[in-house]
Amino acid sequence: MNRRELLAASAASTLLGTGGCIANLDPRDEKSTDPDDENTTDENTVPGCTSKAEWTGDITSGPADPDPDSIAGHRDCANADRPEPTGNVCETFELEKQNGEIDEFRSVGVEPYPEPPNTFDEEPLTEYVYEYEDAYQQNKAVSEYGERAYGAGAEILDDWGDPTRRLDIYDQITVVGIRFAPPVSYVTRDGNFVGDDNLSEQAVYGVDETGIVRIEEPYLDNDEKIVESPPNPVEDGDLLECF
């Protein structure tokens, strides 16, 4: 589900129930019918939802002899980690409304992380960071709620007049600050609807030809804090991936 579909689903959900609850929520399992293969998934069984039994590619594999000034030179690529939900996370939930009509809620599913850009100039990197944060937040929600998550992602905020800011911390590593809101919609185990707008957050990414790092901190009513005194993602952030 993309960001526009997320907003539409959230708006529809608000009309369907009050107090965070909906009645007659009936999950219709769309998993593989093969009882001998629990990880078999077919992403076409739930339109717009992707399951991944395994993630391809090795995010811990970096250059053999990295430049000491690069991300891989600062960090140990063997420690790279990011949200990568596995198993079947796609399901369709049917909701019978009071007028007898049926509405469907579909799991948001896994969002593949974007491939590194062909060029590491500022403009393609800011778009890359935007897409990465969107995938990060969606996969984080699916890691927590599984198939019960039907809306997730990152809504980039433009309080700075521009949704991203280039921050000059390193010469060879592009450091980008970003403000976002990570709304999540999911179905509780007892069948209630929950829509959590979550608070605004700030993150700072570092990207170069060898990898990507990220550090997050809460938004504390200071739009310029992340610009004036940004945290250091290369030294203190999470290593998400080596290229």
Image: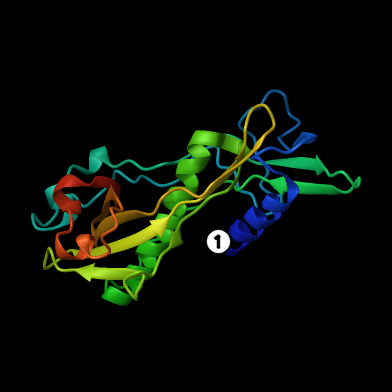
Helix, strand or loop status at disc 1: helix
Q: Disc 1 residue type?
A: Arg
Looking at the picture, how far across and down is residue 63, in whole percent?
21, 52
Q: Would residue 157 be found to the left or right of residue 80 on screen?
A: right
Toward the right, the furthest residue is 100
Q: Quadrant of the N terminus?
A: bottom right
Toward the left, the furthest residue is 68
Q: For residue 101, say whether it is visible.
A: yes
What residue do we see at 36% from left, 43% from top? 82
Q: Would residue 47 be found to the left or right of residue 213 on screen?
A: right
What residue do we see at 80% from left, 49% from top? 103
Look at mark 1 in the image and give the residue it sits on: 3
Q: Quadrant of residue 140?
A: top left
Q: Would residue 231 be found to the left or right of residue 158 on screen?
A: left
What residue do we see at 72% from left, 52% from top? 15
Q: Quadrant of residue 179?
A: bottom left
Compared to residue 144, the image places residue 181 above or below, namely: below
Q: For residue 110, say whether it is visible.
A: no
Looking at the picture, how far across and down is residue 21, in whole percent?
68, 37
Tell me which colouring the rendered structure shows: rainbow
Compared to residue 152, the image places residue 158 above or below, namely: below
Work out whether residue 68 or residue 113 is closer to the camera in this orientation and state it: 113
Work out whether residue 81 or residue 37 is closer to the camera in this orientation and state it: 81
Work out whether residue 30 or residue 182 is closer to the camera in this orientation and state it: 182
What residue do we see at 20% from left, 65% from top? 227
Looking at the picture, how far across and down is residue 16, in whole percent?
74, 48
